[in-house]
Image (cartoon, rainbow, N blue to C red):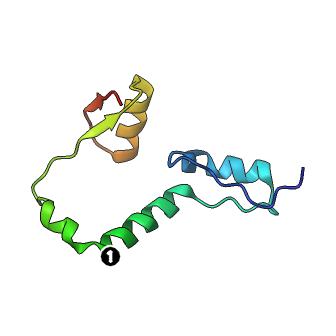
């Protein structure tokens, strides 16, 4: 099969991006979904400055997941460089 582009549909794929690009080869474009999401959010926030008035500068971070497992928590703590509390939610 001759694939010229591969679009990754999840923001956690950057963790595997090097490996995926290696498998796909240099002729296949594999954009970083994390960078695309971050750029899109930045653009949205720039166009909707009214969002900032609803934010508080002294707020706390909350980490919500739909599938909670200890491996995720350990990896997140290592990535963020701090201990975190993760809460599972139903959707």
Q: Is residue 84 above or below residue 29?
A: above
Instruction: For the C terminus, give its image quadrant.
Output: top left
Q: Which residue corresponds to mark 1?
A: 47
50 vs 12, left or right, is left
Residue 40 in percent (x, y) is at: 44, 66
Q: Nearer the viewer, residue 30 or 78?
A: 30
Quarter of the rendering containing residue 82? top left
The quadrant holding residue 46 is: bottom left
Secondary structure under badge 1?
helix
Question: Is residue 59 shown left or right of residue 15?
Answer: left
Q: Residue at x 80, y 61 (%)?
A: 4
Q: State the residue at coordinates (38%, 26%).
A: 68
Q: Is residue 20 left or right of residue 87?
A: right
Front residue of this view, candidates 45 and 73: 45
On the rendered structure, is 75 left or right of 53? right
Mark 1 is surrounded, within 10 Å at the Cα level, by few (under 14), some (14 to 19) or many (20 or more) other residues, namely few
Residue at image position (75%, 51%) is 22
Residue 37 position (above or below residue 16): below
Residue farthest along the right direction in this orientation: 1
């Amino acid at each position: 099969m001759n694939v010229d582009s591969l679009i990754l549909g999840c923001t956690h794929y950057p963790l595997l991006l090097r490996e995926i690009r290696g498998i796909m080869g240099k002729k296949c474009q594999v954009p970083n979904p994390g960078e695309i999401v971050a750029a899109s959010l930045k653009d949205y926030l720039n166009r909707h400055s009214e969002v900032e008035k609803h934010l508080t500068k002294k707020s706390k971070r909350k980490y919500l997941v739909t599938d909670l497992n200890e491996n995720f928590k350990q990896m997140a703590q290592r990535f963020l460089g701090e201990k975190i509390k993760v809460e599972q939610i139903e959707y």
